[in-house]
Image (cartoon, rainbow, N blue to C red):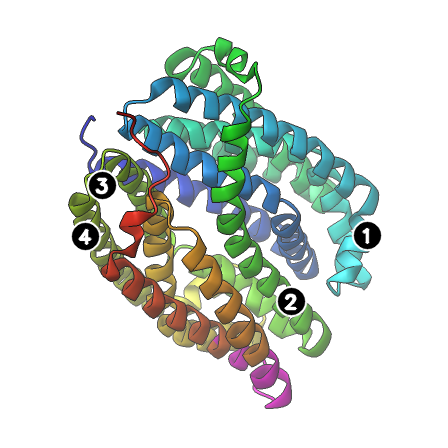
Amino acid sequence: MKEMKLFNLAWPLFIETALFMLLGVIDVFILSGYDDLAASAVSTANQAVSIVTIVFTVISSATAVMISQYLGANKRTDASQVAALSITLHVAFGLLISMLFVFFCRPILSFIGASGKILDFGCQYLTIVGSMMFVQAFLGSVSVIIRNHGLTKISMYVTVGMNVMNTLLDMVLVPHLGVTGVAIATSVCRILGGFALAFILFRKVESISIFKLLVPFPKDKLLAILKIGVPSALETFLYNLSQLTITSIVLRFLSENELIAKTYVQNITMFFYLFAVSIGQASQIMIGHLVGAKEFDKAYRQGLRSYRTALIITAVACAVGMCFREPLLRIFTDNTEVIMLGMNILLINCLLEWGRTTNLVLIACLRGSGDVYFPTACAIFSNWSISVLCSYLLAVVAGLGIYGLWIALAADEFVRGILMLIRWKSGKWRTKRIVKNEG
C-alpha cells in the first residue's frame, strides 16, 4: 500500500471544506445585505435539506469505508464495483428526493416552525435547490470515490472553481432576484462541478466500464453498504434532527434577534472546527487503508496523532476568533443587540469546540476502522437526553434564551467526546474490520 501522510491528505481537504463552507457563508453574507430574515430562511431551509438527504450519508459513508479498506487489502476490482454501485444509488435516490422537495417544500418548512417571511423565502430557495438534489448526490458520490483513492487535491480544485463562480453569480443575481438568485447560483455551480468531477473520475481513477460490474447485481455489496452506512447515517441523522428540533425551539420560543444571532454565529464557528473536519476526513481515509492491510497498531497511533493535531489547531483558531469576534459579527450585521448576543455566544462556544473536535476526528477514525455502531449508540443517548432536552429546559424553562441553548450544545459535544476517546483507546475497533482478506 502506498504510504499516506496526514498533511498531504488533509491540506487539500481543508481548503476544499473551507471553500465549501464559504459557499454558504457567501450566500448568507450577500443575503444579509438584502434582508436579515432571508439569510435566516436559507439557513433554516438547508437544515431541512440535511435531514431529508440522510440517504446520501448512508451510501457515501459506507462507500468511503469500503473503498479505502478494499484498496488497503489490494482488492481493486471490489473497490471499483463499490464505486459503480455508489454512483447508481446516489443518483436514483437523488431523483426521488428532488421530487419530494419540489412538491412538498412548504409543508416541510412549516413542520419545522418556519412562518411568515421566513417560510416564503425558504420556499423560494428550496424549490430550486431541492429540484437539483440529484446533482448534489452525484457530486458527493464522485467526490468520495476520488478522495478515498488518495486524490484529495482534485476535488479541492473543483471546489475552488465552484466557489469563484458562486460568488460571481451571487453578486450578479441577488440584488435583482434575492433568495431566488442564491438558489440559482448554488444549483448552477453544483451542475458544473458535477460535470468536472465526472470527467476527472473516468479519466484518472476509474473506467466508465465499471458499471458492467453491476451485472450480476452485487447484493453482497449492497448489504455491506447498508450494514456500514445505516448506523453511520443514523448518527448523522440524529445529530441533524436534534439541530432541527433545536431550530424549531428557537423559531417558536426565542426572539427574532436571537434567531439571527444563531445564524451568524454558526457561520463564524464553521471556521473554528474546519481544521478538525479536514483532519478527520483525512484520518478516516488513512485508518481505512491501514485497517484493510491489518496494520492495527499504526492505525491506533495515527488516530491519536490526528486527534492531538486537530486539538492544537482548533485551540489556536478559537483564540484568534475570540480576539476578533466583534469585527467578525459586524461583517454580517450592524444590529447592536445581535452583535452583543453573538459575542457572548462565541465565548461559550470555546467550551463546545473541544468536544466537537474530539468527535469529528475520533468518530471519523472509528468509521474508517468499521466501528460504526458505538458512535450511533452514543448519539442516540447524547443528542436527545442532553442536547435537545437541556436546550428546552435551559433556553425556555430556565429563561436563559440563546445562552441556555449553547450551554446544552456544549454539554452534548463534551460528553460524546469523552466517550469517543475512551472507545478509541480501548482498541475494540480492531475487531470491526469490514474487508476480510482471503487465503
> Residue 130 sits in which quadrant?
top right
Q: Position of residue 63 (x, y in %)?
A: 46, 34
Query: Which mark is drawn over residue 82?
Result: none
Residue 398 among magenta residues: yes
- Tell me the crowding category of disc 1: few under 14, some 14 to 19, or many 20 or more residues within 10 angstroms, Cα based: some
Q: Answer yes or no: do the residues labelled 3 and 4 have beta carbons within 8 Å?
A: yes
The alpha-carbon separation of the residues under discs 1 and 2 comes to: 17 Å
Magenta residues span 392-406
Residue at the image point whose x is 60% and y is 50% from the top: 50
Q: Distance from label 3 to label 4 (Cα)?
A: 9 Å
User: At which x and y percent is residue 302?
Assistant: 20, 47
The residue tagged 4 is: 305
- What residue would you read off at disc 1? 106
Amino acid type at mark 4: Arg
* Separation of residues labelled 2 and 3 (CA atoms): 36 Å
Residue 343 pos. (x, y %): 45, 74
Identify the residue under disc 3.
Answer: 6
Q: Distance between the residues labelled 3 and 1?
A: 44 Å
Q: Residues within 10 Å of mark 3 (few under 14, many from 20)?
A: some
Identify the residue at image location x=28%, y=23%. 74
In primary-sequence order, the first of circles 2 and 3 is 3
N-term mark: 3 or 1: 3
When the figure is inspected, residue 364 is found, relative to residue 254, above or below; the finding is: above
Earlier along the polypeptide chain: callout 4 or callout 2? Answer: 2
